[in-house]
Amino acid sequence: MHQRSWEVGTRVTASYKSGEYIGEIAEASNGAKQAVKILAVIKHPTQGDLHHPMDPDVPFFHQRRALAYQEIALVPGESIRPYDGEVPEYGASLQTALEQERQRLERLVRWAERCCEELDQLRKEYRL
């Protein structure tokens, strides 16, 4: 498969280890991975064991930090897309991404609680 050649300084979005970022190409490469300098966070990385999603009882529950401002990450070329929007300030983007991830998880907790309530009601109806 032909790898796209990116010019240094080109603004991109990049997925990296369950996070999503806005960055710029830091080094020209025709290889499978591109060096991307991180400028902002779109989606905070997922916590926990990615091989056992939504399982809190795994032997090692991973804590994943977002990539730092101007950190260089070697990103698979297939997860890089051009970006032409405004780049938000890193700190503000990190705060927004962290809060969005927290809200997503809090909603998931409310969903699980509601499921348990419905199952409890069904247990009564089933007379179990």
Image (cartoon, rainbow, N blue to C red):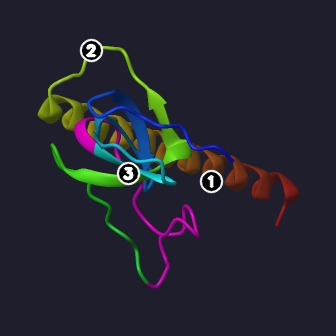
Q: Quadrant of residue 52?
A: bottom right
Q: Nearer the viewer, mark 2 or mark 1?
A: 2
Disc 2 on helix, strand or loop?
Answer: loop
Can you give x and y, in whole percent of width and height, for residue 82 in the image?
44, 25
Majority secondary structure in the magenta region: loop
Residue 48 within the magenta-colored segment of the rendering: yes
* Label at residue 45: 3
N-term-proximal mark, 2 vs 1: 2
Residue 38 within the magenta-colored segment of the rendering: yes
Q: Amino acid at mark 3?
A: Pro
Can you give x and y, in whole percent of width and height, for residue 2 in the image?
64, 43
Closer-to-camera residue (30/81): 30
* Label at residue 116: 1
Badge 2: few (under 14), some or many (20 or more) residues near its Cα, within 10 Å? few
* Mark pair 3, 1: CA separation: 28 Å
Residue receiving disc 2: 86
